[in-house]
Image: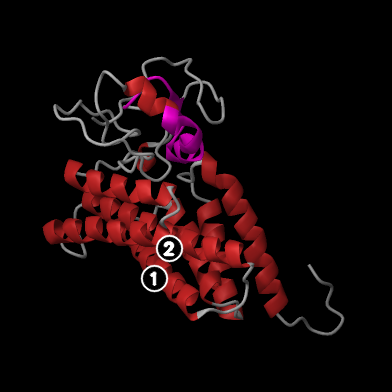
Protein backbone atom coordinates (compact mmCIF):
# COMPACT_ATOMS: atom_id res chain seq x y z
CA UNK A 1 0.00 0.00 0.00
CA UNK A 2 1.09 3.59 -0.42
CA UNK A 3 1.87 5.78 2.55
CA UNK A 4 -0.63 8.33 3.73
CA UNK A 5 -0.27 11.80 5.13
CA UNK A 6 0.30 11.66 8.86
CA UNK A 7 -2.66 12.66 10.98
CA UNK A 8 -0.48 13.25 14.05
CA UNK A 9 0.80 16.82 13.67
CA UNK A 10 3.25 16.31 16.57
CA UNK A 11 4.98 13.29 15.05
CA UNK A 12 8.79 13.75 14.94
CA UNK A 13 10.82 12.76 11.90
CA UNK A 14 12.66 9.50 12.64
CA UNK A 15 15.79 10.86 10.97
CA UNK A 16 16.11 14.56 11.85
CA UNK A 17 13.62 14.74 14.78
CA UNK A 18 11.80 17.71 13.28
CA UNK A 19 8.27 17.83 14.69
CA UNK A 20 5.35 17.63 12.28
CA UNK A 21 6.74 15.05 9.84
CA UNK A 22 3.92 14.70 7.27
CA UNK A 23 4.32 11.15 5.98
CA UNK A 24 4.39 7.73 7.59
CA UNK A 25 6.17 4.49 6.69
CA UNK A 26 3.40 2.42 5.17
CA UNK A 27 4.92 -0.93 6.12
CA UNK A 28 5.38 -0.67 9.89
CA UNK A 29 3.16 2.41 10.32
CA UNK A 30 5.32 3.37 13.32
CA UNK A 31 7.69 6.07 12.09
CA UNK A 32 7.31 9.38 10.29
CA UNK A 33 9.55 11.38 7.95
CA UNK A 34 9.82 14.89 6.56
CA UNK A 35 10.41 13.69 2.98
CA UNK A 36 12.10 11.04 0.86
CA UNK A 37 15.62 12.29 1.69
CA UNK A 38 15.05 11.81 5.40
CA UNK A 39 13.75 8.31 4.75
CA UNK A 40 16.72 7.50 2.53
CA UNK A 41 19.14 8.60 5.25
CA UNK A 42 17.30 6.61 7.93
CA UNK A 43 16.51 3.46 5.94
CA UNK A 44 19.60 1.44 6.90
CA UNK A 45 18.85 2.01 10.58
CA UNK A 46 15.12 1.41 10.21
CA UNK A 47 15.10 -1.48 7.72
CA UNK A 48 15.35 -4.38 10.17
CA UNK A 49 12.98 -2.95 12.76
CA UNK A 50 10.53 -2.06 10.01
CA UNK A 51 10.27 -5.66 8.84
CA UNK A 52 9.99 -6.98 12.40
CA UNK A 53 7.22 -4.53 13.31
CA UNK A 54 5.31 -5.41 10.17
CA UNK A 55 5.40 -9.17 10.88
CA UNK A 56 1.93 -10.54 11.40
CA UNK A 57 0.20 -7.78 9.43
CA UNK A 58 1.00 -7.02 5.83
CA UNK A 59 3.92 -8.77 4.16
CA UNK A 60 5.14 -5.50 2.70
CA UNK A 61 4.27 -2.17 1.18
CA UNK A 62 4.83 -0.68 -2.21
CA UNK A 63 5.81 2.84 -1.29
CA UNK A 64 6.86 3.66 2.26
CA UNK A 65 6.60 7.36 1.49
CA UNK A 66 4.30 9.49 -0.54
CA UNK A 67 3.67 13.18 -0.28
CA UNK A 68 0.15 12.77 -1.59
CA UNK A 69 -2.66 11.01 0.24
CA UNK A 70 -3.34 7.58 -1.22
CA UNK A 71 -5.73 4.76 -0.45
CA UNK A 72 -4.51 1.34 0.62
CA UNK A 73 -4.10 -1.42 -1.96
CA UNK A 74 -5.72 -4.78 -1.39
CA UNK A 75 -2.57 -6.75 -2.26
CA UNK A 76 0.60 -5.89 -0.30
CA UNK A 77 3.87 -5.58 -2.19
CA UNK A 78 7.51 -5.60 -1.14
CA UNK A 79 8.85 -2.84 1.11
CA UNK A 80 10.84 -0.01 -0.43
CA UNK A 81 13.12 2.61 1.14
CA UNK A 82 11.68 5.47 -0.82
CA UNK A 83 8.78 7.61 -1.70
CA UNK A 84 9.27 7.72 -5.37
CA UNK A 85 5.68 8.82 -5.74
CA UNK A 86 5.64 11.58 -5.50
CA UNK A 87 6.93 13.13 -2.71
CA UNK A 88 7.93 14.75 -5.86
CA UNK A 89 10.63 17.31 -5.99
CA UNK A 90 10.42 19.20 -2.75
CA UNK A 91 6.80 18.37 -2.13
CA UNK A 92 6.51 18.66 1.62
CA UNK A 93 3.77 19.96 3.81
CA UNK A 94 3.33 23.69 3.83
CA UNK A 95 4.89 24.45 0.45
CA UNK A 96 3.22 26.30 -2.38
CA UNK A 97 0.97 24.39 -4.80
CA UNK A 98 3.67 24.72 -7.49
CA UNK A 99 5.69 22.17 -5.51
CA UNK A 100 2.80 19.75 -5.05
CA UNK A 101 3.35 16.02 -5.13
CA UNK A 102 3.68 14.24 -8.44
CA UNK A 103 1.08 11.49 -8.67
CA UNK A 104 2.76 8.68 -10.60
CA UNK A 105 0.51 5.86 -11.82
CA UNK A 106 0.80 2.91 -9.46
CA UNK A 107 2.61 0.60 -11.90
CA UNK A 108 5.24 3.28 -12.63
CA UNK A 109 5.50 3.96 -8.92
CA UNK A 110 6.24 0.28 -8.33
CA UNK A 111 9.06 0.35 -10.90
CA UNK A 112 10.47 3.57 -9.48
CA UNK A 113 10.33 2.14 -5.96
CA UNK A 114 12.26 -0.92 -7.12
CA UNK A 115 14.86 1.40 -8.62
CA UNK A 116 15.06 3.38 -5.39
CA UNK A 117 15.56 0.19 -3.40
CA UNK A 118 18.56 -0.61 -5.61
CA UNK A 119 19.86 2.91 -5.16
CA UNK A 120 19.49 2.67 -1.38
CA UNK A 121 21.73 -0.40 -1.53
CA UNK A 122 24.20 1.63 -3.64
CA UNK A 123 23.54 -0.54 -6.68
CA UNK A 124 23.43 2.52 -8.88
CA UNK A 125 24.02 0.87 -12.24
CA UNK A 126 20.97 -1.37 -11.95
CA UNK A 127 18.99 1.51 -10.47
CA UNK A 128 19.69 3.58 -13.60
CA UNK A 129 18.37 0.75 -15.78
CA UNK A 130 15.28 0.34 -13.62
CA UNK A 131 14.46 4.06 -13.77
CA UNK A 132 14.83 3.70 -17.51
CA UNK A 133 12.04 1.12 -17.49
CA UNK A 134 9.72 3.57 -15.76
CA UNK A 135 10.62 6.34 -18.20
CA UNK A 136 9.99 4.12 -21.23
CA UNK A 137 6.66 2.98 -19.80
CA UNK A 138 5.59 6.59 -19.27
CA UNK A 139 6.72 7.58 -22.76
CA UNK A 140 4.70 4.72 -24.24
CA UNK A 141 1.59 6.37 -22.81
CA UNK A 142 2.19 10.09 -23.15
CA UNK A 143 4.98 10.36 -25.72
CA UNK A 144 8.50 11.67 -25.23
CA UNK A 145 7.25 15.28 -25.21
CA UNK A 146 4.04 15.13 -23.13
CA UNK A 147 1.66 18.06 -23.30
CA UNK A 148 -0.20 17.63 -20.01
CA UNK A 149 1.28 19.43 -17.02
CA UNK A 150 1.02 16.40 -14.74
CA UNK A 151 2.62 14.14 -17.36
CA UNK A 152 5.47 16.61 -17.78
CA UNK A 153 6.04 16.71 -14.03
CA UNK A 154 6.04 12.92 -13.91
CA UNK A 155 8.60 12.74 -16.70
CA UNK A 156 10.72 15.39 -14.99
CA UNK A 157 10.60 13.47 -11.71
CA UNK A 158 11.73 10.18 -13.27
CA UNK A 159 14.45 11.80 -15.37
CA UNK A 160 15.76 13.65 -12.33
CA UNK A 161 15.87 10.43 -10.32
CA UNK A 162 17.79 8.64 -13.08
CA UNK A 163 20.20 11.58 -13.36
CA UNK A 164 20.77 11.44 -9.60
CA UNK A 165 21.50 7.71 -9.73
CA UNK A 166 24.09 8.24 -12.47
CA UNK A 167 25.73 11.04 -10.51
CA UNK A 168 25.81 8.95 -7.35
CA UNK A 169 27.45 6.15 -9.35
CA UNK A 170 30.17 8.60 -10.39
CA UNK A 171 30.72 9.89 -6.85
CA UNK A 172 30.87 6.35 -5.47
CA UNK A 173 33.60 5.29 -7.90
CA UNK A 174 35.60 8.41 -7.18
CA UNK A 175 35.21 7.92 -3.45
CA UNK A 176 36.28 4.27 -3.54
CA UNK A 177 39.13 4.72 -6.01
CA UNK A 178 40.19 8.13 -4.72
CA UNK A 179 39.87 9.20 -8.32
CA UNK A 180 39.46 12.77 -9.51
CA UNK A 181 40.86 12.71 -13.04
CA UNK A 182 39.14 12.04 -16.34
CA UNK A 183 37.63 8.60 -16.91
CA UNK A 184 35.69 7.72 -20.11
CA UNK A 185 33.04 5.67 -18.29
CA UNK A 186 32.43 8.30 -15.63
CA UNK A 187 32.26 11.02 -18.26
CA UNK A 188 29.71 8.94 -20.18
CA UNK A 189 27.56 8.70 -17.05
CA UNK A 190 27.89 12.44 -16.49
CA UNK A 191 26.74 13.04 -20.07
CA UNK A 192 23.70 10.81 -19.53
CA UNK A 193 22.94 12.66 -16.28
CA UNK A 194 23.20 15.93 -18.16
CA UNK A 195 20.76 14.75 -20.82
CA UNK A 196 18.25 13.53 -18.22
CA UNK A 197 18.47 16.61 -15.99
CA UNK A 198 18.26 18.95 -19.00
CA UNK A 199 15.17 17.12 -20.16
CA UNK A 200 13.67 17.30 -16.67
CA UNK A 201 14.34 21.03 -16.37
CA UNK A 202 12.72 21.60 -19.75
CA UNK A 203 9.67 19.49 -18.90
CA UNK A 204 9.22 21.15 -15.51
CA UNK A 205 11.04 24.48 -15.26
CA UNK A 206 10.18 24.74 -11.55
CA UNK A 207 11.92 21.46 -10.70
CA UNK A 208 14.76 22.84 -8.56
CA UNK A 209 16.46 19.47 -8.16
CA UNK A 210 16.66 19.08 -11.94
CA UNK A 211 18.66 22.32 -12.16
CA UNK A 212 20.92 21.16 -9.34
CA UNK A 213 21.63 17.83 -11.08
CA UNK A 214 22.17 19.60 -14.40
CA UNK A 215 24.84 21.78 -12.83
CA UNK A 216 26.53 18.81 -11.16
CA UNK A 217 26.51 16.88 -14.44
CA UNK A 218 28.10 19.81 -16.26
CA UNK A 219 31.03 19.78 -13.86
CA UNK A 220 31.16 15.98 -14.09
CA UNK A 221 31.72 16.15 -17.84
CA UNK A 222 34.61 18.62 -17.66
CA UNK A 223 35.88 21.66 -15.79
CA UNK A 224 36.24 23.95 -18.76
CA UNK A 225 35.25 27.58 -18.41
CA UNK A 226 31.99 27.06 -20.33
CA UNK A 227 31.01 23.99 -18.28
CA UNK A 228 31.84 25.87 -15.10
CA UNK A 229 29.78 28.83 -16.25
CA UNK A 230 26.84 26.55 -17.11
CA UNK A 231 27.11 24.82 -13.74
CA UNK A 232 27.24 28.09 -11.81
CA UNK A 233 24.19 29.39 -13.68
CA UNK A 234 22.25 26.17 -12.92
CA UNK A 235 23.15 26.37 -9.22
CA UNK A 236 22.02 29.98 -9.09
CA UNK A 237 18.78 28.96 -10.77
CA UNK A 238 18.16 26.18 -8.24
CA UNK A 239 19.10 28.34 -5.25
CA UNK A 240 16.61 31.02 -6.22
CA UNK A 241 13.62 28.73 -6.62
CA UNK A 242 10.84 28.69 -4.00
CA UNK A 243 10.38 25.00 -4.84
CA UNK A 244 13.86 24.08 -3.56
CA UNK A 245 13.21 21.54 -0.78
CA UNK A 246 14.81 22.09 2.60
CA UNK A 247 16.88 18.91 2.45
CA UNK A 248 18.64 20.14 -0.72
CA UNK A 249 19.37 23.70 0.39
CA UNK A 250 22.74 22.85 1.93
CA UNK A 251 23.74 20.75 -1.09
CA UNK A 252 22.86 23.58 -3.47
CA UNK A 253 24.82 26.04 -1.33
CA UNK A 254 27.88 23.77 -1.40
CA UNK A 255 27.74 23.25 -5.15
CA UNK A 256 27.12 26.91 -5.78
CA UNK A 257 30.41 27.59 -3.99
CA UNK A 258 32.19 24.78 -5.85
CA UNK A 259 30.99 25.95 -9.25
CA UNK A 260 31.92 29.56 -8.43
CA UNK A 261 35.44 28.57 -7.42
CA UNK A 262 35.81 26.37 -10.51
CA UNK A 263 34.63 29.19 -12.73
CA UNK A 264 36.96 31.67 -11.02
CA UNK A 265 39.91 29.35 -11.55
CA UNK A 266 39.09 29.20 -15.27
CA UNK A 267 38.66 32.95 -15.63
CA UNK A 268 41.75 34.98 -16.38
CA UNK A 269 41.65 38.34 -14.64
CA UNK A 270 43.18 41.55 -16.05
CA UNK A 271 46.50 42.63 -14.53
CA UNK A 272 45.97 44.53 -11.28
CA UNK A 273 42.32 43.50 -10.97
CA UNK A 274 41.51 42.43 -7.37
CA UNK A 275 40.35 38.84 -6.98
CA UNK A 276 36.78 38.47 -5.80
Relative to the observer, which residue lies in front, 106 or 250?
106
The magenta region covers 27-48
Residue 202 in sight: yes
Residue positioned 53% across, 65% down in the render: 173
Which residue is situated farthest in the bottom direction here? 271
Query: Would residue 243 be counted in the magenta stretch?
Result: no
- Disc 2: which residue: 166
Residue positioned 36% across, 43% down in the render: 88
Query: Residue 234, which numbered label?
Result: none
Q: Earlier in the sequence, mark 2 or mark 1?
A: 2
- Image-quadrant location for residue 160: bottom left
- Disc 1: which residue: 192
Q: Tell me where residue 108 appears, x and y as whole percent.
A: 21, 48
- Image-quadrant location for residue 6: top left
Q: Residues within 10 Å of mark 1 (few under 14, many from 20)?
A: some
* CB under 8 Å between discs 2 and 1: yes
Amino acid sequence: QAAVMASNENAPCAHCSKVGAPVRCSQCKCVYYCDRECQRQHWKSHKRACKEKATGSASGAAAPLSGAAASARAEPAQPSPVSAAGAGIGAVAGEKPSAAAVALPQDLLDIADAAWALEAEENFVEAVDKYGEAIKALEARVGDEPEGAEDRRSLALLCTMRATANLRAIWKVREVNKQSGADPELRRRAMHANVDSSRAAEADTQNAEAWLRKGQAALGMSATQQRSKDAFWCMQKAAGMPSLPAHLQHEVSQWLSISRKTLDSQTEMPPGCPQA
